[in-house]
Image: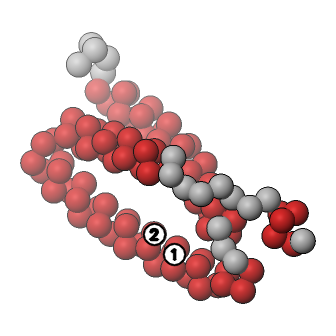
Amino acid sequence: MAGLPGQIVISWGLIVFGIVFAFNSAVHSYLVLAYTEHDQVTLNVGFYYMANSGGRLLGTVTSGIIYQTFDIQGCLWVSSLFVLVASLISLFLPPVKSPEKVQG
């Protein structure tokens, strides 16, 4: 839309997305452990991986439907909306306990 070649914009957009996704994944893993009580680590990590795989399945199906209905622009708008909603939800997360308080 800005006069740039679509293939280049999408390719670079996917590269940036991949980098952000990698950092986001690391933050999720940290948060799962940071919010977990010591005796419930395996349960919570297992639940995280189960929810993650369910979310990926739902996201794949949803993105396919959105792409078929609204094309790539619809996918970008809907994903932007999901990022905004996730950001707003994360504002209400309780503070993480510092390691000193957990051990002490």
Residue 59 lies in what quarter of the image?
Answer: bottom left
Give the image location of residue 9, x and y in percent: 36, 27
The residue most toward the left is 69
**Which one is nearer the viewer's eye here, 97 or 6?**
97
Q: Secondary structure at mark 1?
A: helix
Q: Quadrant of the N terminus?
A: top left
In this rendering, would 84 be left or right of 62?
right
Write down the residue under mark 2. Answer: 52
- Residue type at the position of mark 1: Tyr
- Residue type at the position of mark 2: Asn
Picture layout, residue 66 above or below residue 61: above
The reply to whether residue 22 is in sight is: no
Q: Quadrant of the C terminus?
A: bottom right
Residues at circles 2 and 1 in contact by the CB criterion of under 8 Å: yes
Give the image location of residue 46, x and y in percent: 55, 82
Residue 75 lies in what quarter of the image?
Answer: top left
Q: Secondary structure at mark 2?
A: helix
CA gap, disc 2 to disc 1?
A: 5 Å
Snapshot colouring = secondary structure
Give the image location of residue 72, x and y in percent: 22, 39
Write down the residue under mark 1. Answer: 49
Give the image location of residue 23, x and y in percent: 60, 48
In this rendering, would 101 be left or right of 53?
right
At horizontal 52% and vertical 73% (from top left) the residue drawn is 48
At horizontal 29% and vertical 62% (from top left) the residue drawn is 60
